């Protein structure tokens, strides 16, 4: 039953996030907000809404390991699991923005998270403000220097909704996110108790993979259709938002403390390691291209992480 709660929660979170995205983009276009700004802010925050709601709910419910485990586990899953599987379906060309901005910002955010947690094992409000401020600076940089990339990320079919449907999607999206977070957090906490494991283990395995399913499906479809919509930059962007937006906002609302030290002795080092490895992968053996061999290595590493964690 608890597993069904988790599945139902994930389904509602995915649907709620998509509905909220449709409403937010359509409303922004109706208000004549430039498409570049919509792609940079509205789309990015809407797609991160499920992770944000889950982390907020978990932290406020006294389950900070779920909040942290969800973010750290999702970052590992995005690069190890999602990217690994995607590369099995075809090679991926890498843009130069990867090493100029995306990868450095992801590593900076990851290292900052490690130092914020390593000192006192808690992310307090001023540290959350630092994380969120870094996100704002990053978005300002993208708006100034990478406008074309941002416009590509904007859905093209979200501008024909009437006011009624915008409000309808906004409401059901919000309800879906709220109900999904309730079920997911409740199911994850109960499953941890049933199996006699920590909430952190459930978070970095079941919950994190579940919240990475939308990225996985979008990535595979895009590669099969040979579209440019998916790239390593998209997955890295998701990792950046997970740390700077999700944990930044959550810790501003309430401190996020570590209960299970496995997050610091194991999980976060896997996140740092796999994140770092993407840099040499992009240059070796062929510059600016990832292929199925990289995918197999990433999947083996992700499997090793799951084995080591369990």
Image: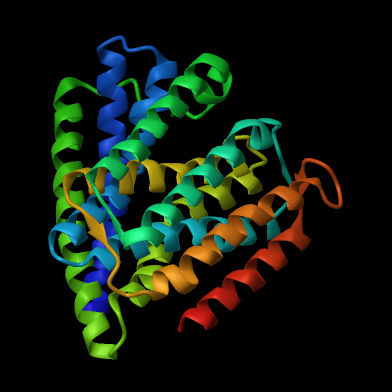
Vertically, is 275 above or below 204? above
Residue 231 seen in the figure: no
Residue under the image location 46 percent in, 73 percent down: 265
Vertically, is 1 above or below 216? below
Quarter of the figure that contains the C terminus: bottom left
Quarter of the rendering containing residue 179? bottom left
- In the image as oriented, which residue stretches furthest toward the right? 285
- In the image as oriented, which residue stretches furthest toward the front? 119
Of the pair 83 and 71, the residue shown nearer to us: 71
Where does the image place residue 29, in percent across and percent down from the top left? 31, 16
Residue 71 seen in the figure: yes
Say how many tags the image has.
0
Side (left or right) of 8 relative to 71: left
Of the pair 309 and 85, the residue shown nearer to us: 309
Q: In this figure, which colouring scheme has been used for the structure?
A: rainbow
Of the pair 202 and 220, the residue shown nearer to us: 202
Quarter of the rendering containing residue 132? top left
Side (left or right) of 216 relative to 132: right
Quarter of the rendering containing residue 12? bottom left
Where does the image place residue 190, in percent across and percent down from the top left? 19, 80
Residue under the image location 55 percent in, 74 percent down: 305
Quarter of the figure that contains the N terminus: bottom left
Side (left or right) of 209 relative to 19: right
Where does the image place residue 290, in percent across and percent down from the top left? 75, 50
Where does the image place residue 173, in percent across and percent down from the top left? 20, 43
Residue under the image location 52 percent in, 60 percent down: 271
Vertically, is 270 above or below 44? below
């Amino acid at each position: 039953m608890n597993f069904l709660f988790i599945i139902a929660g994930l389904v509602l979170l995915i649907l709620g996030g998509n509905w909220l995205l449709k409403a937010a983009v359509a409303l922004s276009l109706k208000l004549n907000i430039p498409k570049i700004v919509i792609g940079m802010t509205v789309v990015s925050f809407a797609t991160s809404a499920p992770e944000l709601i889950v982390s907020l709910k978990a932290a406020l419910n006294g389950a900070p390991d779920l909040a942290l485990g969800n973010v750290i586990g999702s970052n590992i899953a995005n690069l190890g699991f999602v990217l690994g599987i995607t590369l099995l379906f075809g090679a991926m060309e890498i843009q130069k923005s990867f090493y100029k901005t995306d990868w450095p910002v992801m590593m900076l955010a990851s290292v900052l998270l490690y130092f914020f947690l390593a000192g006192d094992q808690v992310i307090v409000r001023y540290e959350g403000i630092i994380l969120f401020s870094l996100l704002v600076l990053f978005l300002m940089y993208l708006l100034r220097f990478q406008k074309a990339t941002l416009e590509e990320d904007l859905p093209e079919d979200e501008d024909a909704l009437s006011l009624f449907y915008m409000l309808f999607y906004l409401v059901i999206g919000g309800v879906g996110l709220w109900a999904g977070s309730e079920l997911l957090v409740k199911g994850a906490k109960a499953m941890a108790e049933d199996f006699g494991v920590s909430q952190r283990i459930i978070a970095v395995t079941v919950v994190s993979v579940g919240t990475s399913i939308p990225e996985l499906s979008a990535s595979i479809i895009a590669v099969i259709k040979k579209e440019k919509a998916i790239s390593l930059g998209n997955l890295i962007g998701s990792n950046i938002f997970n740390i700077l937006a999700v944990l930044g906002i959550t810790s501003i609302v309430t401190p996020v403390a570590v209960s299970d030290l496995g997050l610091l002795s194991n999980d976060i080092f896997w996140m740092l390691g796999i994140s770092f490895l993407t840099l040499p992968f992009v240059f070796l053996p062929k510059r600016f291209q990832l292929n199925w061999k990289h995918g197999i290595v990433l999947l083996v590493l992700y499997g090793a992480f799951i084995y080591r964690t369990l």
